[in-house]
Image (spheres, rainbow, N blue to C red):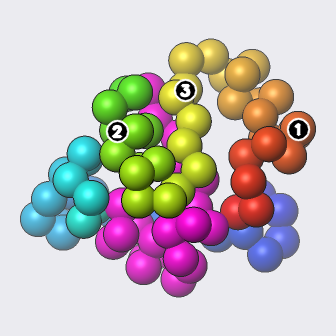
Amino acid sequence: MRPGRRAAARGHARVGFAKPDPRIYRAAAELAGVAVERCLFVDDSAENVAAAGALGMTGHHHVDPADLRALLRSGRAGSW
């Protein structure tokens, strides 16, 4: 991970709700200490990606590692 970047993860059992509940995405952003608009959310579920995007996160539906790698290298993943 590049300097200045942060990753956050917390199991849904610890916060009491799970994807695609909007509260889980807000909790992840809070844990990372950033606004949801500064978050990149990657998931293999299109429903979960759409839920994160509805809150303002940059979402990526993960299907292939090469696609994610290309997205991260391209700068199209947003300002996270």
Question: Residue at the spot x=46%, y=48% of the render?
Answer: 53
Q: Amino acid at mark 3?
A: His
Residue furthest to the right: 74
Say what amino acid the circle numbered 1 marks.
Ser
Marks 1 and 2, how far apart in space? 23 Å
**Which quadrant holds residue 1?**
bottom right
Q: Which mark is residue 5?
A: none
Q: Which of pointers 3 and 2 indicates the residue nearer the eye?
A: 2
> Taking 8 as reference, is 47 above or below it?
above
Query: x, y percentage for residue 12?
Result: 21, 57
Q: Position of residue 15 (x, y in %)?
A: 18, 69
- Please state the total of marks drawn on the protein image: 3
Write down the residue under mark 3: 62
The residue under label 2 is which amino acid type? Asn
- On screen, residue 40 versus residue 10, left or right, reads right
The answer to if 32 sits in the magenta stretch is yes
| CB atoms of marks 1 and 2 within 8 Å | no
Label 1: few (<14), some (14–19) or many (≥20) C-alpha neighbours in 10 Å: few
Q: Give the residue pinned by disc 2.
A: 48
Q: Which residues are magenta?
A: 25-44
Residue 9 visible in the picture: no
- Give the quarter of the image for residue 20: top left
| Residue pointed to by mark 1 | 74
Q: Secondary structure at mark 3?
A: loop
Relative to residue 76, is residue 46 drawn left or right? left
Residue, x 18% and y 67% (percent of image)?
14
How far apart are labels 3 and 2 at the CA level? 11 Å
Residue 10 percent coordinates (x, y): 34, 63
Image quarter for residue 78? bottom right
Q: Is residue 40 visible?
A: yes
Local SS, label 2? helix
Q: Secondary structure at mark 1?
A: helix
